[in-house]
Amino acid sequence: MSIKRYGPFIIFFYVFAVIALICASAWDLPLDMKLNNPDSLFAIWFRNTGEIPSRLIPVLAGAVLAKTCEKKIQKLCGCIICLGGSAYLGYHMAQYFFAADKNHMQPEDIAFGILYGIGVGVITLMVIRLIHIPKAMAAPLRRIAVICIIVMFAQIIIIEGSKYLWGRVRFRDLLKAGSYDSFTPWYHPNGINGNKSFPSGHTAGAGMSFTMMFLPYISKKWRKKTALCFFLPFIYTCTVGFTRLIMGAHYLSDITVGAVISFTVVIIAIKLYEKKFGRG
């Protein structure tokens, strides 16, 4: 497997992103004005679930480490990562599914969510114990699990740092103010001011599904499915991004850059993996 097999898809992605940013330079605000419908059940569902790929990475990666590592201390670390990630997943679930008000969660909402998440982690660890992993797959699985965790944190740091530095006002906040005067184009950083529209965290979280592109490096069965490993995450990420426009949470440029950041981090990780461990 070589990243060159992804070459046409990588080119397609960046051409698509450039076109989107060019369009956003002129139509960021008009597009949100046209699409805004925060009561859309379709958009609300993806608001609640869109970031799940990012939240699942430590759960699944930790379980893989617990299963494939040989030393007990490494297995323990895998369990801790899995359970810690699942507790974070549970907090996310509580915020969007269990709490009456996601912006003002009660202590009992948080406690229930964390316990729920830990339960998911325990079940994940139990299930993976029953799965047979061929010895030849153990090493690449272990390496990619670690890489995916690093990729997830890198994406979060870049996204959150950019949000604070850009200080772009969300479309829904413009509506609340009753004026579009505070709108700024995506290429205009505003500095730290508490606004966090650019880039889209939900879209970047959905973009962590691009880690699926590592699958051909684990199993030869997936090497003929490189198109699937690209287009499934691409369609999912675009869908989540589109719903962020409907919710009035972001602009076209916000979701485009969010997707670009996640995709680029994954591509860099794949390239570094090839350089360090070969093409498999």
Image (spheres, rainbow, N blue to C red):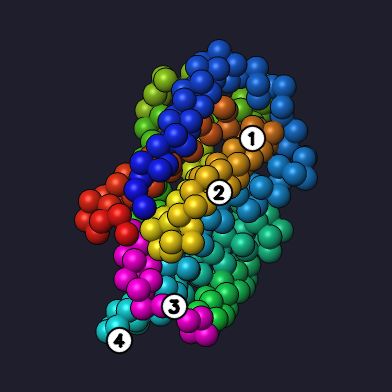
Q: Is residue 135 above or below residue 160?
A: below
User: In which image quadrant can residue 175 be found?
Assistant: top right
Measured in 3D between alpha carbons, the distance from the residue under mark 1 to the one under mark 2, in whole angstroms, is 21 Å
Q: Give the residue type that dot 3 points to.
A: Ile
Confirm whether the magenta stretch covers residue 76: no
For the residues labelled 4 and 1, the Cα–Cα distance comes to 45 Å
Determine whether label 2 and label 4 are within 8 Å by CB: no
Dot 2 amino acid type: Leu
For residue 242, the mark is 1
Question: Mark 4 = which residue?
Answer: 72
Q: Amino acid at mark 4?
A: Lys
> Which is more N-terminal, label 1 or label 3?
3
Residue 132 location (% of width, % of height): 48, 81
The answer to whether the residue labelled 3 contacts the one labelled 4, judged by CB atoms less than 8 Å apart, is no
Q: Marks 3 and 4, Cα distance to the nearest angstrom?
A: 18 Å
Q: Foreground mark, 1 or 2?
A: 2
Determine the secondary structure under disc 4: helix
Label 3 or label 4, whichever lies nearer to me, is 3
The residue segment tinted magenta is 129-148
User: What amino acid does circle 1 point to?
Assistant: Phe
Residue positioned 65% across, 21% down in the render: 31
Task: In the displayed orientation, state which residue is furthest to the top.
Answer: 26
Compared to residue 246, the image places residue 95 above or below, namely: below
C-alpha gap between disc 3 and disc 2: 23 Å
For the residue labelled by badge 1, is the local secondary structure a helix, a strand or a loop?
helix
Q: Is residue 168 above or below residue 157?
A: above
Q: Is residue 92 above or below residue 241?
A: below
User: Mark 3 sits on what residue?
Assistant: 133
Q: Nearer the viewer, mark 3 or mark 1?
A: 3
Tell me if residue 168 can be seen.
no
